[in-house]
Image (cartoon, rainbow, N blue to C red):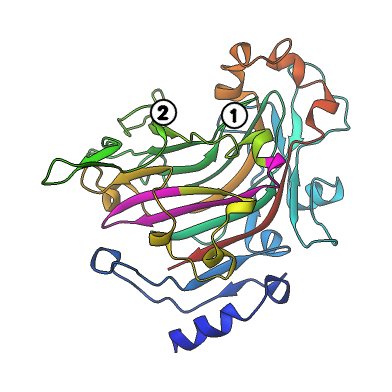
Amino acid sequence: MHALFVTLLAAVSFGTLAGAHRTVARSRHNVARQSNPTYVLQDLYQAEDFFTQWSFFTSADPTNGNVNYLSMQDATSQGLAYVDDCDNSTVLAVDSTSTVPAGGNRNSVRITSNKNYTGGLFILDAAAMPVGCGTWPSFWTDGPNWPSAGEIDIVEGVNNQVSNQMTLHSGTSNACTLPSSKTTDASGNSSAVFTGSVLATDCYSTASADAGCGISDKTSTSFGYGFNNAQGGVYALLWDPSTGISMWHFARANIPADINNMTPTPTNWGTPAGSWSAQTCDVAANFYQHSMVIDTTICGGWAGGAYSSSGCPGTCSQMVSNATNFQDAKWVINYVAVYQ
């Protein structure tokens, strides 16, 4: 039954599936035992799905950003959340027309998937991401009672950052650290485990020390203006509690055919940009029951703190009042897919 469904899926275009959230019967695979595992589509989010299968967050920004997160009704009425009829993409934007005083709060959008996951293959296809001084866009997952169930940052950066930062935040006493970027076999030959640059190795996070263990992607198309100039692309998270967590980014022109065909095969994608092995991180104990989150905040703890060294003019507080600065501060999302 699963094999037949995969065959049928490969013949169905995304246009056919547009606007209809699909939940597929799960097919469990032990990645540790299979050299070339098959992943079956479980959930596909497109177009209106982000309004019916995700919730709009309306509380104060936990990162102390200068934003008001709007309800679905307010975000749609103000044109900050909508489906583009031309290509069926979903747009989530920061307000770029209102008068806001320096240090005030500008309207924005943050959404969270209603469904949670403990592992899987997650793919975000976006045509554009928010850019501009003071912006802090992110696509991430986290579990209940942060940081107890952990957080996985798949896409994150601030201001004029050139490349994407990927980070794990663990919150239990169970060890979770980032291993070396190289591994050595019995013959003494070394090979890369991931291609990114290590930023920190201890994943343990608290409210007062939440840096986590991060890896910076080395490609200029992985974030910000470089990502948008490449017509966007794909981010992929492979989360297997038994083996570890890996992440890839592909610019639009380099997206593997198996992703576009909805038959993703990570073993064919080459060395990931970031990878955290279960040998040095108890993934099962530290990461579970995660919802997906897509948001854009302004200033806050990171974008505000890094603003003076970002090459942006004035202060972050002053930039909040510059409405035109946020004209391109928007997510343009083609789909989010979850495979098991």
Residue depicted at 70% across the width and 41% down the height: 228
Q: Tell me the distance, in whole angstroms, between the alpha carbons under discs 2 and 1.
A: 22 Å
Percent x, y of residue 60: 63, 34
As drawn, 232 above or below 175: below
Residue 303, percent across and down? 60, 23
In the image, residue 22 lies at what x, y percent? 60, 74
Q: Secondary structure at mark 2?
A: loop
**Residue at image location 80% in from the left, 61% down from the top:** 87
Rendered location of residue 94, percent (x, y): 76, 37
Quarter of the image with the C terminus is bottom left
**Residue on which the image places disc 1:** 162
Q: Where on the picture, by quarter, is residue 147?
A: top left
Residue that mark 2 sits on: 210
Q: Which residues are magenta?
A: 228-247
- Mark in front: 2 vs 1: 1
Query: What is the number of callouts on the image?
Result: 2
Tag 1: Cα neighbours inside 10 Å, few (<14), some, or many (≥20)?
many
Q: Is residue 245 magenta?
A: yes
Query: Which quarter shows the N terminus?
Result: bottom left
Task: Identify the image quadrant of residue 315.
Answer: top right
Camera-side residue of 24 and 60: 24
Residue type beneath disc 2:
Asp
